[in-house]
Image (cartoon, helix red, strand yellow):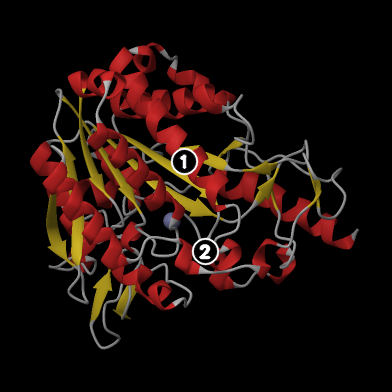
Amino acid sequence: MRRRTILRTLGGIAGVGTLGIGTVSADDCTDDFIKPGGPFPPETANINYNAFTSNADLYNTLDKLDRKSNLEYDSIGETWEGRDVPYVRVDGGDTDVVYVTQQHGDEQHTTEAVLQLLQRFAAGGHQVEKIRDEVTLHVVPRLNPDGWAPADNNETPQRENARPADICHDGPYFGKNQCGSVDPNRQHYFGIDSDILAETDGIDPDLIPNENPSPETQALLDKADEVDADIICDWHHQFTYRNSDCELINASTMWPRNEAAPDEAVNLSRQISAHAYQETTDLGHTTWDRYPGGTTANIARNAHGIRGRGSVLFEFRGQASQLGNAANGKLVTVINTTMNEILEGLASGALYEVDPAAADEIPPRGDYFWKDLPREEWSPEHEAYRE
Ligand SMILES: [Zn+2]
């Protein structure tokens, strides 16, 4: 009982104080009960990263797609450890859509899902051609291969990149003398007018480093500029949440929340979130909530929005350290379905018919739920797992 009281209190604080978009409570769900199926299975007992695509297999697969289909594979940059940042172009219509997976090295199901999507485009067919009439798709599958690399030895992959411990910078969002690895999803403010950063985020322009501490992020930003991207969807994983119906939440989404993002970009982003929700919410086990993301311009979702692009964050259940390969097939299906629905909505035009306000119909944040680690034992390290 005590535990559930704490859960409710923290949920309330987060909803009202920091985020302003509310939360729901799973107070009436007993202990580890979920619907359907009863008690939460012991998923953490089965962590085995060999079930996922290794870095070597990823590059081989992309090479093969490049040779055997009309997809074009290229490297758009190099990581701190010298790995290629992979990029695939699926040529087509005038709407340039970018899908980025695995900015965080420990969020791997998204890459499996986007590889399935690429295989579908390589195979072709009527439905794929309809999408290509309208959309040119740009995919960065696994932006952060250094973060994933430990998993190729079946060790826990890491969220951040692999900048060496003795390389440091002063950063406007995090203070002076930051050394070592950085979070690629916190380095997207490079190139945004410093007057905007000063006005919306209170940033001192003198603290902006000359070079991006995440070359992976800079490679993405450069590519997005080069192709003049209309839409960027950023695919992630989060810890597990449970809603007031005692269902596990598999999918979350959010749009730009920085005040410098133009209305047109925010509305398009809301249409994408709402369309994804509407098209998948009736499918088995695809239970959604709104991701309580922050407002600052260093986060990809906000930074792309400030640049005037449609920009959407998607978060799915299954942070590596929590879930490993449990529920792998189901999660990849949920993600892949969402990726496809957005492209089909853009191709048919149905997505542009969605009322941007409909995004507010996506339920608010559920309650944190991790059977093996009660919320009150969540450390600052876990708190850092955001977006
Ligand atoms: Zn992430």
The residues bearing labels 1 and 2 have C-alpha atoms spaced at a distance of 15 Å
- Placement of 44 over or under 107, stated as above or below: below
- Disc 2 marks a residue whose amino acid type is Ala
Task: Where is residue 246? Give x, y as percent.
Answer: 78, 41
**Which quadrant, please, contains the N terminus?**
bottom right
- Placement of 372 over or under 222, stated as above or below: below
Do we see residue 192 in this rendering?
A: no
Q: Residue furthest right?
A: 1
Going 25% across and 55% down the picture, which residue do you hit?
Answer: 61
Residue 210 sits in which quadrant?
A: bottom left
Going 36% across and 43% down the picture, which residue do you hit?
Answer: 116
- Disc 1 marks a residue whose amino acid type is Ile
* 173 horizontally vs 89: left or right: right
* 40 horizontally vs 148: left or right: right
Task: Where is residue 353? Give x, y as percent.
Answer: 39, 11
Ligand 1 within 8 angstroms of badge 1 C-beta: no
What is the number of the mark on residue 335? 1
How packed is label 1: few (under 14 Cα within 10 Å), some, or many (20 or more)? many
Residue 187 sits in which quadrant?
A: bottom left
Task: Where is residue 16? Give x, y as percent.
Answer: 64, 44
Residue placed most toward the observer, 163 or 276? 276
* 362 horizontally vs 244: left or right: left
Going 42% across and 72% down the picture, which residue do you hit?
Answer: 151
What is the number of the mark on residue 320? 2
For the image, the number of numbered tags is 2
Residue placed most toward the observer, 275 or 197? 275
Task: Where is residue 72? Give x, y as percent.
Answer: 12, 44
Going 48% across and 68% down the picture, which residue do you hit?
Answer: 49
